[in-house]
Amino acid sequence: MYKRQTPGYDGATSHPDGVAPGRSGASPARDWTATGPARTATGPGGTLSTGGPATAEAGPGAGGAAPARAAVAGNLRAPLTSFVGRDADVAALHRDLAGARLVTLLGPGGAGKTRLSQEAARTTAAGVAPDGVWLAELAPVDDPAAVPEAVLTAVGARETVLYGGGAEEMRAATDRTDDPVRRLAEHCARRRLLLVLDNCEHVIEAAARLAEELLARCPHLTVLATSREPLGVPGELIRPVEPLPEPHAMRLLADRGAAARPGFRVDADAETAAACAEICRRLDGLPLAIELAAARLRMLTPRQLADRLDDRFRLLTSGSRTALPRQQTLRAVVDWSWDLLDDAERTVLRRMSVFAGGCDLDAAEAVCGPRALEALASLVDKSLVVAAPAGDGAMRYRLLETVAEYARERLAEAGEHAATAHLHLTHYRELARANDPLLRSDRQLDAIGRLETEYENLRTALRTAVTERDEQEALYLVLSLTWFWQIRGLRSEARHWSTAVMDLGPDPFAPGAPAAVPLWERCTDTPPPIAGDRLWEARRGVHLVHLACMDMKGELKAWQDPAAQEKLRAIARTYEPGMPQVCRNPGTLWFFAVLLTGQVERLREIVDAAVRTTADRPDHAWEHALALQMRANLIANRPDWDGDAVADAARSLEICRRLGDVWSIAEALCARGAANERAGRFEQAADDYRQAVGQVELLGAHAQRDVLRSRLGAVLLETERPERGERLLREVIASGPLGDQESGPAARIVLASWLGVTGRVPEARRYVREIREEFPAAAFIVFDSFIAGTEALLDAMDGSSAEALGHVRRALSGAGDSLSRTIAPHLHSFLLTVAAVALAGHGGERASDGARCLGAAVAALGEEHVSGVAERRLGEHAESVLRAALGDAAYEAAHAEGRGLPVEEAAALV
């Protein structure tokens, strides 16, 4: 059995700068900030990149349930009805969860397993799961292969990315593995969680494999499962969920009966009491059957109800007339309810089965027909549809699991599945299309909430479009959801669906494809169908989304082969700077093709043209703000370019605030912070980053918040109180496993560099080693140069000259790459400075070469370059050890000679 371990638990701490550290599940950071080996450039469209579910307040269930412990984090929803008759079961489950790591609630459909599991989880001791209780509802999952991704989404391990200065544009290229099981294991490995896997029976093998894998790899994880059969995992503790004893069943019938018919009492008279006892007994005390029976009390007396169960009771016990094993208990109850429906009610009920996770009234009317309102009201009364308010206060309607399964069968029998699925697809395509522009407005938060609420329906619509090979519907859905995916950090979703949709049509960048023409309107501005230039542009957009969402472990490497490089060159050739469609997403993602093909000199032309194209069009204010952000980030990183990065970022911020776009406000603040940082205005930069953190917290983008906190920590190292920055960087690193963090690699590189120049090399090496071992992109040429440069710095500061020179040579081999020069134009100077320290230890002519390297490094930086604190300390240390090795006169002569050397010639001295 998986026995419980009880390790120590460290709670989160507060930060004096007012930025909460938090805990976040995210992917590796792309933010290689200035205090690392080099300063970096940023891209325009960023990467397609939510915060985890909100914490639910724990509370005692009505009807004498166990008292609640202190609330813990998680995604359990507050109960909407009383909890009756399971006090002893809850107490037993608390004991089970305290001693075992896998507990399965086992029982037939309708036994109350789901409600019991959530009550036990809600009231569990905080010591069992200090990092939260997370519910993964598997009932909507119809593909066993999708179980890990569904659980990953449920626990909130999402990716979020924010643009900014430095190399943030490369975050699109740095996603970790697509394996959701690995990502789940990384997310849970250092956390003490209680994971509730609800309704495992229809995906039993997938759920069992996942549970066993997570328990083996995550020693502090506890799993509570509900199923109609055991998972069959070693160490599983089975807790049968027995039918309610008669007294408790009667209490349940009394409670639900009074809700259905005000004033109803099971003990109103002797006849009523006898009939109610018969109902409970004949229904074997199964809560769902009792609740369905109670719903009929609106139109039947208890005696009438008991009498009508005669035939159904025989079906419930014999099973001889049951079509499927999982329906042996509840089919008779649902059949009985179905028989009482009129034609309109039956039509609506079976069509409601196409929804995933429920729907609102508009969706029900669009999919189920004009009589949906009247029929829904009746179905709610009959307890076949559950109505509950959503977060925005509007009512949502959903089917109980067994009812939904039953209704899907009826839908297929009626021959209506294809037509109903298409109505569902059409409705949610329009919902996505209508909400996409709102994501760039002051209605952004509402639009995000609406799309999140309906996301399972949107995924179902995408699945329908891809399965039916309906290219236009699929194109519309992907293009309408692209910006939502960006904001909420759903990069893997964007990659998955863009890949699937690319296969539905021709390659728009293949030889012979039509040339791109300027298009001011978005492809999704009007409903489908589209044709001609707009259709081809829509196809290009989906391919660009896929390019921006390449995963770091596999696809980025694949883009380096000759065929892929030719496609990148074809993409780069397709557009001209200033074309309207490349001034907005997803067209701005064209920038990555230009970047990855090393066409550095085109970048300034591209951003200048985008600013000009959008400048005088009020209907393109958002696009103009984006173009200004792009230019600000590039200019801040390239002091040899003319322009005012702070002014561009400030103008972008003004526009974004006028539009009310919270996400873009944060990006503009980040761009201004980067510009101030590069100019040496560190306090102003820190203030910009703090404000940006506040904006992303409004969005609930926790991983994105840590990216900004990492940037803030780096810039605080430059102030008079560097300990604040060091503490913040440690908090970011401690917030979760490296594989979970967007900010993890950047925070480790920055902190390792700082520790190296302040005499704490052993600790610094640990952080660099973590990146080498756990960051999927560590071997890619650009990132390998960053990491090797940091390793060289630590070797040099530790007196390991030979090792330092070896790492410098490795880093220099990648620093000359055109992509590296674009992202980190000062990387050569940093590496030459490290080499100077290492060469000083060799004395003689090699020390003179070190002074030449240092001179070349200083000259390459230029007079306007503002060095970071780690860079300054490294340079000062290099000069000190070289003067000691050579003497002042020889040092000055060699240094002056080096100032006249190009960096490539100086590198040859290493």
Image (cartoon, rainbow, N blue to C red):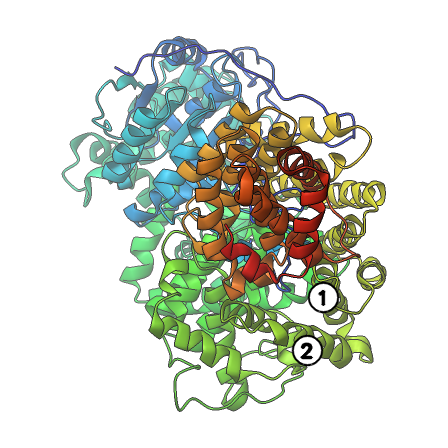
**Foreground pick, 99 / 483:** 483
Above-or-below relation of 626 to 216: below
Please, which residue is most extreme toward the left here?
320
Indicate the quadrant containing the N terminus: top left, top right, bottom left or bottom right.
Answer: top left
Per the image, the residue denoted by label 1 is 626
Quadrant for residue 664, please give it. bottom right
Residue 571: mark = none
- Location of mark 2 (residue): 605
Q: Earlier in the sequence, mark 1 or mark 2?
A: 2
* Residue 195 in sight from this viewpoint: yes
x and y percentages locating residue 740 in the rendered image: 49, 38
Characterize the local packing of mark 2: few (<14), some (14-19) or many (20 or more) Cα atoms within 10 angstroms: some
Which is more foreground, mark 1 or mark 2?
2
**Camera sees residue 385:** no
**Which residue does the image show at 27% across and 28% down from the upper left?**
212
| Amino acid bearing label 1 | Leu
Left/right of residue 193 with respect to residue 360 in the rendered view: left
For label 1, the crowd category at 10 Å Cα-Cα, with few meaning under 14, some 14 to 19 and many 20 or more, is: many
Instruction: Assign a secondary structure to mark 1.
Output: helix
Q: Give the x, y percent position of residue 808.
A: 49, 46
Question: Height in image: 94 above or below 453?
Answer: above
Residue at 54% x, 59% y: name it. 820
Query: Vertical placement of 370 versus 742: above or below?
Result: below
- The spot of residue 162 in percent (x, y) is 64, 51
CA gap, disc 1 and disc 2: 15 Å
Q: Is residue 667 toward the left or the right of residue 480 in the image?
A: right
Kind of residue sitting beneath label 2: Glu
Residue drawn where x is 57% and y is 78% of the image: 527
Residue 732 screen position, x and y as percent: 61, 32
Is disc 2 placed on a helix, strand or loop? helix
Q: Nearer the viewer, residue 893 or 871?
A: 893
Marks 2 and 1: in contact by CB < 8 Å? Answer: no
